Image (tube, helix red, strand yellow):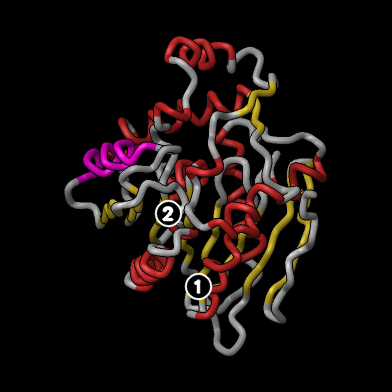
Amino acid sequence: MSNKNEPTLLPNESIEWVKYDGIEYYTRLYNPQDSPAVANLIIVHGFGEHSDRYEPLARHFCKNNFRVLAFDMKGFGRTGRKQGQLGGIGQFDKVYKQINHFANTLLLQKYSDTSKLFIYGHSMGGCIVLNYCAVPEYASSISAVISSAPALKVDPSAMPPAILVSVLKVVSRFLPSIPVSSNINPADLTSDPVELEKYKQSFYNYNLTNIGSAGSMLDEGDACRLIKAKSYTVPCMVVHGKGDKVTSSQGSSEFYDNLPASLDKKLIIHESNFHELHNEPDFKDIVFDQYLDWFKSHI
């Protein structure tokens, strides 16, 4: 049976439904308990999942006095269930506007203890945050970015045949709402059986999108790693599992290689075959510390 249980909140955590552009978004705020925040952090989840899966990471940052905001994107998680349309985030430029709106209204304009703003994204969210930071008007407010296993280049095993990809990119511009499912195998996400079962049973994970959103992700992934990277200005760390079977670590390497030589940047490729290093027993603590060290070095 699917698990619809609501998260168990700590006293310093709160949930708020925020209406933006006609859609109600599920948001969750993690506020430091004992000290003023040293920085703000936005977490952007990946395809087919929801933001509460990042609770351990958010709490790790919160314990280190980061104020953390996570939200379910349009079409996903609780936002998608309430909206009644599953899997379609729309064009990426509209997603960037959502992130900017939440950053301003729920963090920067609401709290005065810090103006520092960081952003983290995983998989599809990793592609989104890298593209977000390539837009000058948004990049100016971001102190550093972390992208985990970004969907800059999808692993061939998770992709339709090449001819269908070409057709998808064309059709997505004219019939964006046609629903499709991905080829993602949940067993490729993590080796942790408990986490994997939680993923499979959750009412808020679903392997659906539409061809407009899929086409947008493919286009934006290509553009980011091949073109936008060359004029990047935001300090950037990219982390990937070498044998990731969902998104290709080669895409992360290509993006990194195209970044300006003078940019403050870091690429870490771990010897793992799984997509979610933050849920891997052998890597979770390692990447948590790497993420924290990167952001703390840019405060």
Q: Is 121 located above or below residue 36 in the figure?
A: above
* Horizontal and vertical percent position of residue 145: 40, 56
Q: Are marks 1 and 2 in contact (CB under 8 Å)?
A: no
* Horizontal and vertical percent position of residue 161: 45, 15
* Horizontal and vertical percent position of residue 100: 58, 51
Residue denoted by label 1:
61
Instruction: Categorize mark 2 by other alpha carbons within 10 Å: few (<14), some (14-19), many (20+).
Output: few
Which picture quadrant has residue 155? top left
Q: Is 285 located above or below residue 81 in the figure?
A: below
The residue at 55%/56% (across/down) is: 193
Instruction: Categorize mark 1 by other alpha carbons within 10 Å: few (<14), some (14-19), many (20+).
Output: many
Residue 242: in sight, yes or no? yes
Q: Is 69 located above or below residue 250 in the figure?
A: below
Residue denoted by label 2:
140
Stretch of the chain drawn in magenta? 248-260
Tag of residue 196 = none
Left or right, 42 with reference to 240:
right
Q: Secondary structure at mark 2?
A: loop
Report the magenta stretch's main SS: helix
Which picture quadrant has residue 211? top right
Q: Give the amino acid type for the residue marked by disc 2 in the picture.
A: Ser
Q: Nearer the viewer, residue 206 or 294?
A: 206
Residue 299: in sight, yes or no? no
Q: Give the amino acid type for the residue marked by disc 1 in the picture.
A: Phe
The residue at 66%/32% (across/down) is: 208
Q: Nearer the viewer, residue 267 or 204?
A: 204
The residue at 26%/55% (across/down) is: 265
What is the CA distance from the residue labelled 1 to the residue labelled 2?
A: 23 Å
